[in-house]
């Protein structure tokens, strides 16, 4: 199922390579197949195409935090970027994610 989705997203990317939505959806399909390195590349591509693509940022951070070998520092940096976006400044869900990661690293003052 996810393989088929990946193939379809790749076709969309071929037709519209500058549309970040196709790239982050492709990343999700790769993530669901446990292709984390390729998913990371696709998330980064989506973000490079449109830095304000909040869904790409959030999904990327979530993947970094929850993959089998978590990359907590990278996830925290991504969540911090998200909190600087005007529409996300007071997002309590992202603030909670940051707080948990600060606790994880023993930085209780942030």
Image (cartoon, rainbow, N blue to C red):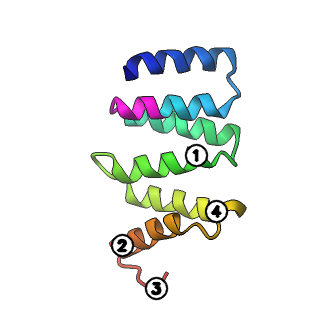
Which of the marked residues, 3 or 4, is nearer the chain's N terminus? 4
Which residue does the numbered mark 3 point to in the structure image? 109
**On-image quarter of the N terminus:** top left
Q: Quadrant of residue 88?
A: bottom right
* Callout in the foreground (2, 4): 4
Circle 4 SS class: helix
Q: CA distance from mark 3 to mark 2?
A: 11 Å
Circle 1 SS class: helix
Q: CA distance from mark 4 to mark 1?
A: 11 Å
Which residue does the numbered mark 1 point to in the structure image? 55
Q: At 48% across and 15% down in the image, what residue appears?
A: 7
Q: x and y percent of residue 43 in the render?
A: 54, 39
Binning the other alpha carbons within 10 Å of mark 4 as few (below 14), some (14 to 19) or many (20 upward) gives some
The boundaries of the magenta stretch are 28-35
Q: CA distance from mark 3 to mark 4?
A: 21 Å
Which of the marked residues, 2 or 4, is nearer the chain's N terminus? 4
Which of the marked residues, 2 or 1, is nearer the chain's N terminus? 1
């Amino acid at each position: 199922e996810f393989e088929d989705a990946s193939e379809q997203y790749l076709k969309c990317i071929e037709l519209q390579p500058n549309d970040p939505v196709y790239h982050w959806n492709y990343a999700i399909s790769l993530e669901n197949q446990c292709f984390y390195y390729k998913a990371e590349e696709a998330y980064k591509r989506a973000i490079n195409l449109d830095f304000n693509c909040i869904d790409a940022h959030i999904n990327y951070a979530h993947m970094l935090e929850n993959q089998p070998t978590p990359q907590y520092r990278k996830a925290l940096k991504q969540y911090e970027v998200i909190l600087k976006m005007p529409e996300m400044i007071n997002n309590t869900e992202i603030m909670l994610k940051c707080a948990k990661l600060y606790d994880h690293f023993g930085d209780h003052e942030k």
